[in-house]
Image (cartoon, grey):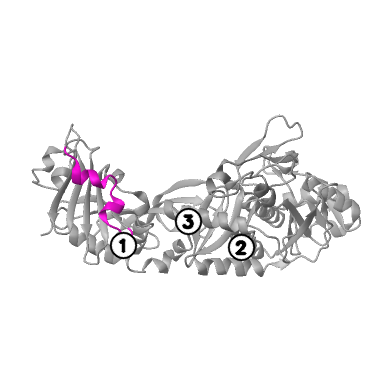
Amino acid sequence: MQSNRKNKITLYLIKDRCNEKDFIISYDKYLNDSKTDYLIKEISPNIKLFYTKVYNNSPIWLDSFFKSDTDLKKLYNASIKLILLYKNKEGRFFIVSFGRGKNLIDNDMIENHFGLKVALNLLKQDDLRSIDRVSIGGNQKSSRDQLPKYGNIFDFGADIERDLINKVAGKVSDNGIVKGMISGSDAVTLSSDVDIDNIGSTIDSIFSIYKKDYYKTNFGWIDNIESVKNKKLINELDEKLIESLNSNKGQFWSAVPEIIDWGNVDYFKVVNIKEKQDDIYIDVLLKSFRKELKNAKQLKSKKVKLFDAIGNEPLKTWSAYNCIYGEMDYENNTYCINNGKWYQISKDYRKMIETDFENTDKSEIRFDLFQTQMCKTENDYSTMFVNNHPNDYILMDKNNIYHGGGRNQIELCDILAKDDTLIHLKPYSGSSTLSHFFNQGLVSADLLLSDKEFRDKANNKINASSNDEKFRIDENKSLRIVYAIIQKDKGGSLPHIPFFSKVSLKYVKSRLKAMRCTVELATIHKVD
């Protein structure tokens, strides 16, 4: 029987092969509570209610959804905890949450992105009104963006290769079940002509929508990257991480997890290691444990500190866990750890990113070694390199250009070579720093090619350093952008960088190539 009243419901799908005791918190209390504060009501063979008593004012949905149920009339207050449990013919469990009912569910048992896929299967490309996203290729910034009118994913300024989309909301225009707005994340929230009489058939219809692949046409990118939320899986991945570190498989390495000013860095200090370090090295981290490394808790407790030349107080402190990067395969899936978070990466997406990275042009510039006894910073190295090759390069590091009003400072590059070659240097670091590094090269090139005033300022700086016309930037020639990463030799012809740095590099390369620039990568080998 179709309801005459429209209700808003929030629906969760429970992971396959779970039982009630697995996903309902304090399940035993519902069976044994003598005070009857934890109650179960069976509506039909495949529908049950789980709820707890509170006393105050009655919420409106008690009448609109549950209609004349006299038992539920005893419940009061919109903050009550109530869930409707539905089991379909396939044995899958669904939960409709009322009040604060979600607190009765174990989050680890909820199917990830169920609501997101339902929503995107129903929404058209230009039906989006808001999105929640995390910038995984940069500083892990979370944001919620809304449009004043409906639009597509690109109207939000989202980068589908570097942003993790966790939630969308939009308006469904042509579906018989959903009426108007829908939002989807792990849960789906929607309005429909639904109540206790037809909730089972409504859930069946929503589940049939979930199993479709309509979203792949316009929103297929949501399958590329997924944040791992399941605590059990995270523990298993951490165990594999520890196993790999102890066996020295080389799958994981360490790096500074955030953007820092390397010019202010004097040294790093790892607890239990007396010697000062010029960087964060995985072998030093492992050596610092007095007892055998057995679990991730030890990594999370281990502190890594950054000091400046004064050295009285650390400028930054991180856990060793947050400094570890790497990828691995586990149970037919690919995962990576980035700044203390685990992500699941689709195999096709990983293959595409790795292939693009491997096809990056290798620079033929013969860089000198970065000898730590002679150089502490990238500026030290840049100065040394230019002094060693005075006829071929000029130093531009810290020779910033004021542009754009106020005190905006743009660094043209670190080292300038002849014939429009801009060399950018950066010590190896985590995804956040390297993503920022790649983007700096993009900003500089964009201004040189599109802004005559900036190009004139840049050439004035260049003329002050050299009379050789071959160093001047010519707007009619294509730029050659060289990204050189300083790190200890890890083998291979390309630098060893985190997965999400490769994602950022792919984006920057595509932008630079569209601007008729060539892009090259190089490794500057660091030696003690």
Quadrant where the N terminus sits is bottom left
Q: Is residue 29 rendered magenta in the image?
A: yes
Q: What residue range appears in magenta?
A: 15-34
Q: Nearer the viewer, mark 1 or mark 2?
A: 1
Q: Earlier in the sequence, mark 3 or mark 2?
A: 3
Identify which residue is drawn at 79% across, 60% down. 420
Residue 326 in which image quadrant: bottom right
Above-or-below relation of 64 to 346: above
Residue 90 in which image quadrant: bottom left
Q: Earlier in the sequence, mark 1 or mark 2?
A: 1
The Cα–Cα distance between marks 1 and 2, rounded to whole angstroms, is 39 Å
Residue 277 visible to the viewer = yes
Badge 1: how crowded within 10 Å, few (<14), some, or many (20+)?
few
Identify which residue is drawn at 83% across, 56% down. 369
Residue 316 in which image quadrant: top right
Identify which residue is drawn at 57% across, 60% down. 327
Residue tagged by mark 3? 236
Q: Nearer the viewer, residue 491 or 121?
A: 491
Q: Amino acid at mark 2?
A: Lys
Q: Amino acid at mark 3?
A: Glu
Contact? badges 1 and 2 (CB < 8 Å): no
Contact? badges 3 and 1 (CB < 8 Å): no
**Secondary structure under badge 1?**
loop
The numbered mark at residue 506 is 2
Residue tagged by mark 1? 17
The Cα–Cα distance between marks 3 and 1, rounded to whole angstroms, is 19 Å
Report x, y in % for residue 382: 82, 50
Horizontally, residue 181 falls left or right of residue 268, namely left
Residue 158 visible to the viewer = no
